[in-house]
Amino acid sequence: MQKNDTKEFIDLLINLSEIFNNGNPLSEKAVEIYFFILNEFSIKDVENAVNFLLRNRTMHGFPKPAEIIQSIEDSKNDGYR
């Protein structure tokens, strides 16, 4: 991701928060950490992973960065997105 993807990235985290965090916002530091960890991927990859999680995830709690990464990697390996 690039710095100019920040707003779109935050919007994706807000979407996740609405479903998996009872609408409670993430802290600014948490957003920074997620961006830092996921910045090696394109915003489109992250968007696809978030959408996949929104459609398919049944666990409680906010998805960890590793779960988003796993979703991205699975989609590239399996070609299902």
Image (spheres, rainbow, N blue to C red):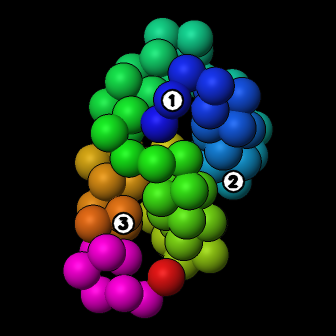
Q: Which residue is mark 2?
A: 19
Could you tell me residue 40's position as x and y percent?
32, 39
Residue type at numbered disc 3 = Ser
Numbered range of the magenta stretch: 74-80
Drawn side of residue 52 relative to residue 16, left or right = left
Q: Which residue is at a point 66% across and 45% down the rendered structure image?
A: 12
Who is closer to the viewer here, 9 or 24?
9
Q: Which residue is at a point 27% across and 48% down the rendered structure image?
A: 66
Q: In the rendered image, is residue 57 in sight?
A: yes
Q: Secondary structure at mark 3?
A: helix
Picture layout, residue 9 above or below residue 43: above
Could you tell me residue 26's position as x and y percent?
60, 24
Q: In the rendered image, is residue 30 in sight?
A: no
Q: Which residue is mark 1?
A: 2
Q: Which image quadrant is residue 76 in?
A: bottom left
Residue type at numbered disc 1 = Gln
Picture layout, residue 27 above or below residue 59: above
Q: CA distance from mark 1 to mark 3?
A: 20 Å
Residue type at numbered disc 2 = Ile
Q: CA distance from mark 2 to mark 1?
A: 26 Å
Drawn side of residue 15 relative to residue 6, left or right = right
Q: Which residue is at a point 45% across and 28% down the rendered structure image?
A: 35
Q: Secondary structure at mark 2?
A: helix
Q: Which residue is mark 3?
A: 71
Could you tell me residue 39's position as x and y percent?
39, 34
Q: CA distance from mark 2 to mark 3?
A: 17 Å
Mark 1, residues whose alpha carbon is within 10 Å: few (<14), some, or many (≥20)? few
Mark 2, residues whose alpha carbon is within 10 Å: few (<14), some, or many (≥20)? some
Could you tell me residue 46's position as x and y percent?
50, 52
